[in-house]
Image (tube, rainbow, N blue to C red):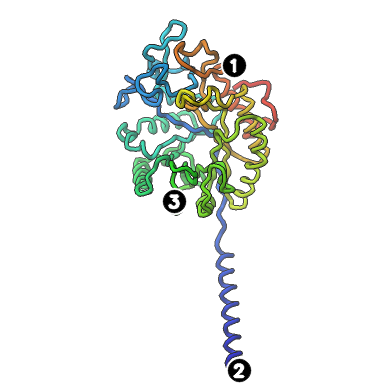
């Protein structure tokens, strides 16, 4: 009899505990999907420097490996600089265009950043993610964060938004959390997020953490540490966007296969998979929609997350990596970029990131570029907009992005083919 009563008590307690746990879970609110003000965003490097631009190091940076020459250039796409202020321009030693001095630009003067953001306004781009490489923060601090301050000013002037996007490439696991905490605390104290132009969702600042879950040794390999980073920013009142591998949803391809990364991915408020170079043609982009976009959107929908596909116009980094082919992923006159945007739209994505605005190193930039080979320096290899046999104006890819923006803003219907009329 005593044994029966004891077992009965145990059953009652077990049932009470089970229902109690269920009640606790039922009362815990699910993650609320945030609303992002804007539809089309671009990555912004802002890292180009040259002698005489006013920067402390007074040297070439990111344009070349040392002094510029045909053998040392580290960029493929030659930018069109005709609309830039003379204060933005840098004469390239020993390089001529049809017998005239060739120029590049520096990102350091406010005149450069101001013109870039004016273009963003003209071509309907909502905002920019300013790249902040974890290992370059000391250098940026030494410069007085001039580019960041210029981005803030230009964004406020043009009605665009800006966001800090931390890039964790090469981060040291022993120091990265403290470095991020210190930098964000300092930026907050300086009032960066108080800017009316800083991107916010539900009045909370958006911060992007790029480089979570990649399978190579150049990125963090500790999911527990990554989760600490994400949760620290969330506890600091931020909406956290994660730059993750293209294969994040299945822990395949470029993603770490460690299942512990699923906790990190699911903790994010916004998921931004990196797709540059993951496909190389319109047909491959179509296949990507079915194999990745649609399943990714389903998963993020189940976790009340915003999904931000990354689209890119093409890719070439021959000068940076001389063994790689020239014009590695052709732009196809804009059809490649447009199809990615169309696929993202019809799959159900509400926002996209265009990679990148000014990344001429890997030739993913959408800023004005030299239309013809004769418009680039005579010396060395340069990718120009006629590489695929097209006769295009310098601002063609900004025009394409303006129509992508119109499609995502609901001003024009989603069409599979690039619209015939492209007027900014």
- Mark 1 nearby-residue class (10 Å; few <14, some 14–19, many ≥20): some
Of label 1 and label 3, which has the lower sequence position?
3
- Mark 2 nearby-residue class (10 Å; few <14, some 14–19, many ≥20): few
Of label 1 and label 2, which has the lower sequence position?
2
Residue 323 is situated, as x and y percent measured from the top left of the image, at 48, 25
Q: Quadrant of the N terminus?
A: bottom right
- Residue lying at the far front in this picture: please name it: 323
Relative to 351, is 60 on the left or the right? left
Q: Which residue is mark 3?
A: 222
| SS category of the residue bearing label 3 | loop
Q: Is the residue under label 2 in contact with that under label 1 (CB below 8 Å)?
A: no
Give the residue drawn at x 56%, y 31%: 312
Q: Which residue is mark 1?
A: 392
Pick the residue in front: 101 or 279: 279
Give the residue drawn at x 43%, y 50%: 229
The disc placed on residue 1 is 2
Whether 224 is drawn above or below 128: the answer is below
Of label 2 and label 3, which has the lower sequence position?
2
Q: Quadrant of the C terminus?
A: top right
From the image, state whether disc 2 or disc 3 is nearer to you.
3
Measure how far apart labels 1 and 2 are at the Cα level.
Answer: 92 Å
């Amino acid at each position: 009899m005593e044994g029966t009563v004891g077992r009965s008590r145990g059953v009652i307690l077990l049932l009470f505990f089970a229902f109690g746990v269920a009640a606790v879970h039922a009362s815990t609110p699910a993650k609320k999907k945030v609303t992002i003000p804007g539809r089309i965003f671009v990555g912004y490097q802002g890292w180009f420097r040259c002698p005489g631009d006013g920067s402390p190091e007074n040297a070439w940076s990111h344009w070349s490996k040392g002094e510029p020459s045909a053998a040392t250039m580290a960029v493929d796409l030659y930018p069109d600089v005709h609309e830039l202020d003379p204060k933005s321009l840098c004469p390239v030693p020993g390089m001529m265009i049809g017998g005239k001095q060739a120029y590049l630009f520096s990102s350091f003067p406010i005149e450069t950043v101001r013109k870039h953001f004016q273009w963003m306004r003209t071509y309907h781009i909502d905002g920019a993610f300013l790249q902040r490489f974890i290992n370059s923060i000391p250098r940026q601090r030494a410069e007085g964060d001039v580019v960041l301050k210029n981005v803030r000013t230009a964004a406020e002037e043009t009605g665009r938004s800006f966001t800090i996007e931390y890039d964790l490439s090469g981060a040291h696991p022993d120091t990265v959390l403290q470095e991020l905490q210190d930098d964000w605390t300092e930026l907050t104290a300086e009032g960066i997020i108080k800017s009316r132009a800083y991107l916010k969702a539900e009045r909370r600042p958006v911060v992007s953490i790029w480089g979570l879950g990649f399978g190579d040794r150049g990125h963090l390999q500790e999911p527990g540490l990554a989760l600490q980073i994400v949760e620290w920013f969330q506890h600091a009142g931020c909406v956290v966007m994660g730059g993750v591998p293209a294969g994040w949803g299945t822990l395949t391809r470029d993603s770490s296969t460690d299942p512990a990364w699923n906790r990190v991915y699911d903790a994010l408020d916004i998921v931004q998979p990196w797709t540059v170079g993951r496909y190389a043609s319109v047909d491959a982009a179509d296949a990507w929609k079915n194999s990745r976009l649609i399943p990714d959107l389903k998963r993020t929908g189940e976790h009340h997350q915003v999904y931000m596909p990354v689209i890119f116009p093409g890719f070439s980094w021959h000068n940076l990596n001389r063994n790689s082919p020239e014009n590695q992923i052709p732009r196809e006159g804009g059809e490649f970029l447009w199809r990615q945007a169309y696929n993202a739209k019809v799959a159900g994505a509400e926002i996209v990131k265009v990679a990148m605005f000014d990344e001429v190193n890997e030739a993913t930039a959408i800023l004005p570029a030299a239309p013809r080979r004769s418009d680039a320096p005579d010396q060395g290899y340069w990718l120009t907009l006629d590489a695929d046999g097209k006769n295009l104006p310098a601002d063609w890819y900004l025009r394409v992005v303006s129509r992508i923006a119109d499609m995502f803003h609901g001003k024009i219907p989603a069409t599979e083919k690039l619209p015939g009329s492209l007027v900014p």
